[in-house]
Amino acid sequence: AQVDKAGHKHFMAKEIAEQPRVLAAALGHYLTPEGRIALPEPCIDFTAIDRLTLVACGTAFYACNVAKYWFEQVARLPVEIDVASEFRYREPPMPARSAALFVSQSGETADTLAALRYAKGQGAQILSVVNVTESSIARDSDIALPILAGAEIGVASTKAFTCQLLVLGALALEAARQRGTIDEATLAAHLQGLRALPGLIDQGLSIEAECQRVSRGLAEARDILFLGRGRMYPLALEGALKLKEISYIHAEAYASGELKHGPIALVDEHVPVIVMAPHDELFDKTVSNMQEVMARGGKVLLITDTKGARIAGDGTWEVITLPEIDPLWAPILYAVPAQLLAYHTAVAKGTDVDQPRNLAKSVTVE
Ligand code: G6P
């Protein structure tokens, strides 16, 4: 079917706005009406594996990075993770009781497909999380899980990322259920948290005007730093990737705790530092890193919730406030400011948002 911009200026803007709807569709596919997890049969037996390998490229790789925290923390399942271009050539040994999961929007990324074939050759069970269900990666998998995001046209991935996270989150909960690492009440609470996502993302989209205003400042910068801790670290990586892809501003992401091991040398009043920090169990640690930045004249944009803003908003350059959310699923909600800041910074700079220079939507050659 012909896909148009439905009144938006760019496909990227349309795809950002579509997220509540496509996430709700994915939820409808992966949860029963009573709110239990419904995975296609036959599904993977998570009690039969001792390790899960996650492999992807680009934004899909950052989705894997978030999922690593989920599988490890909730399902107590050891996770190995790599970008496909490294994984395929480093000849990693794969233990007998292991599965490998490949995440790809297009399902055609050459390195990811080659990595899949390597893992298959090693005898691993092959899972994939794809948007294009008739793709090579889906075809070559034992189990292919669709993300149901609909066609994504903008080169910078947006709705595919949040849908990938949703499917990976449901899968991590299923792994926890099977492995008996989660009690009924906690499982029910996290499932409820997943069900709340379309509504929260919809509310989260109301920060757009603020993101647009802040982006005018970001557009002046030559370098931008992103910081996050725990599950928010991959979001910092995704925020930096998105920004450099479409605005061409140099952006780097660091785990907050690594700040003092190098990047703090870059901090001055010309380098905006974007801190992604919901009020979770690691909030205080991130805030102390943020204060180190401010003590050196750094200009902090804090992205947090109401509680976080109240505790740590003083002295920052800007604060963007998102709704409260189950901290486990915060990475899905915090993708919204990452997308909107990149988008509006690119628009402010007048770059080609949907077709950034030198980039391709699908990289089918090595
Ligand atoms: C390209 C795209 C990215 C994407 C990456 C992986 O670099 O520009 O947006 O994240 O490929 O693509 P895939 O289709 O495998 O998710």
Image (tube, grey):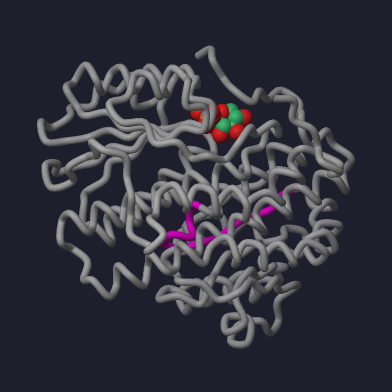
In the picture shown, does residue 186 fall above or below 100?
A: below
Q: Is residue 108 magenta?
A: no
In the picture shown, does residue 130 fall above or below 158?
A: above
Name of the residue lying farthest toward the top: 365
Q: Position of residue 196 (x, y in %)?
A: 51, 67
| Picture quadrant of ligand 1 | top right
Q: Is residue 158 left or right of residue 28?
A: right
Of the pair 299 and 67, the residue shown nearer to us: 67
Q: Is residue 352 left or right of residue 183?
A: right
Toward which corner of the image does residue 42 lie, by quadrant? top left
Q: Position of residue 269 (x, y in %)?
A: 76, 65
Residue at 38% across, 64% down: 191
Q: Position of residue 179 (x, y in %)?
A: 15, 56
Toward which corner of the image does residue 12 lie, by quadrant? top right
Of the pair 134 and 119, the residue shown nearer to us: 134
Q: Is residue 196 left or right of residue 230?
A: right
Residue at 54% across, 69% down: 277
Q: Is residue 17 left or right of residue 118?
A: right
Name of the residue lying farthest toward the bottom: 310
Residue at 55% across, 44% down: 161
Residue at 57% across, 40% down: 149
Q: Position of residue 150 (x, y in %)?
A: 60, 36
Of the pair 180 and 25, the residue shown nearer to us: 25
Q: Is residue 227 magenta?
A: yes
- Please state, as top left, top right, bottom left or bottom right, where the N terminus lies in the image: top right
Toward which corner of the image does residue 11 lie, by quadrant? top right
The image shows a total of numbered marks equal to 0
Of the pair 124 and 288, the residue shown nearer to us: 124
Q: Which residues are magenta?
A: 223-234
